[in-house]
Amino acid sequence: MSKSPLYSNDLSLSPHSKSIPYAADRLREPGRAVNYGFKNLKIKPSLIETIPELEEDPGLKALIEMVNRKDSCFFTVGCASDTVQIAGGHCRKGYLEFAWNCASCVQDAINYFALYFHFNKSLVVKSFNQPVQLKWIIQEAAFSDVETHGFSCVVHIETLPLSSLEQANQAWQLTLRMIDAYLSTVETLQPMPIYQPLSEYSHER
């Protein structure tokens, strides 16, 4: 009898919707994560240096860079990274929110389900077994600057409580690499980009 994997990987649909781009919070409420606003890294990759969430997380920064490459099918909507100490140990948690950089793909939620399905299969094929919970959430979105309605996807990532911060960081980083390796292989047959890099950044990958 095979053992159950250490990880879980689930998918759900959010009843909520959002507008993209979105503005930063004017007021910072105690106890709530700070919203720094949408940064369009597809158009201007150098804005990645202005994202506070990435200052102490090189693994998440590398994933964000990959998702926004010129040849990537996606662009990022938001991200977060944090460590938490609880009674049971140490956790690392955060999220990556992204959307298809394809006017037709972004309008059908089934395209995100396909991503989740094949990612789930790749976890098994590559014998991934980190103590982490992944929760994919598909959400309706209005891409207001390009007058398109569709969907974005948030992948929440949280390690299980581990005995040391080093163990939590290792599980977190290995999970980010797994997501990076998977999303970097995704292609579209007839891409119709929503956003194009500015001419002065067209040489960047």
Image (tube, rainbow, N blue to C red):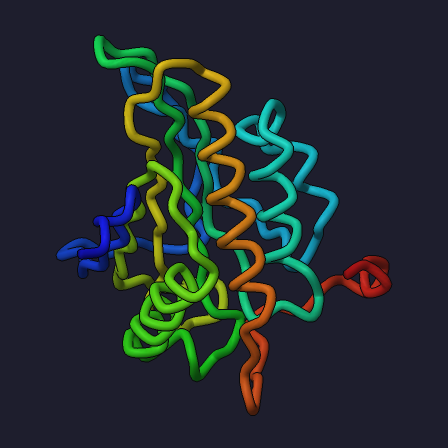
Q: Nearer the viewer, residue 118 or 56?
A: 118
In the displayed structure, would residue 160 be above or below residue 153?
above
Q: Quadrant of residue 50?
A: top right
Residue at 28 percent across and 48 percent down: it is 5
Q: In the picture, which quadrant includes the N terminus?
A: bottom left
Direction bottom: furthest residue: 190
Residue at 29 percent across and 22 percent down: it is 161
Q: Total marks drawn? A: 0
Tell me where residue 76 appears, x and y as whole percent.
51, 53
Direction left: furthest residue: 15
Residue at 35 percent across and 52 percent down: it is 154
Q: Nearer the viewer, residue 69 or 161?
A: 161
In the displayed structure, would residue 12 be above or below residue 100?
above
Q: In the picture, which quadrant includes the C terminus?
A: bottom right
Tell me where residue 105 appears, x and y as whole percent.
43, 80
Tell me where residue 81 appears, x and y as whole percent.
46, 30
Tell me where residue 9 appears, x and y as whole percent.
27, 53
Residue 161 shown left or right of residue 46 in the figure: left
Q: Nearer the viewer, residue 201 or 125?
A: 125
In the displayed structure, would residue 16 be above or below residue 55?
below
Direction top: furthest residue: 87
Residue at 57 percent across and 26 percent down: it is 52
Q: Quadrant of residue 70?
A: bottom right
In the displayed structure, would residue 27 be above or below residue 67?
above
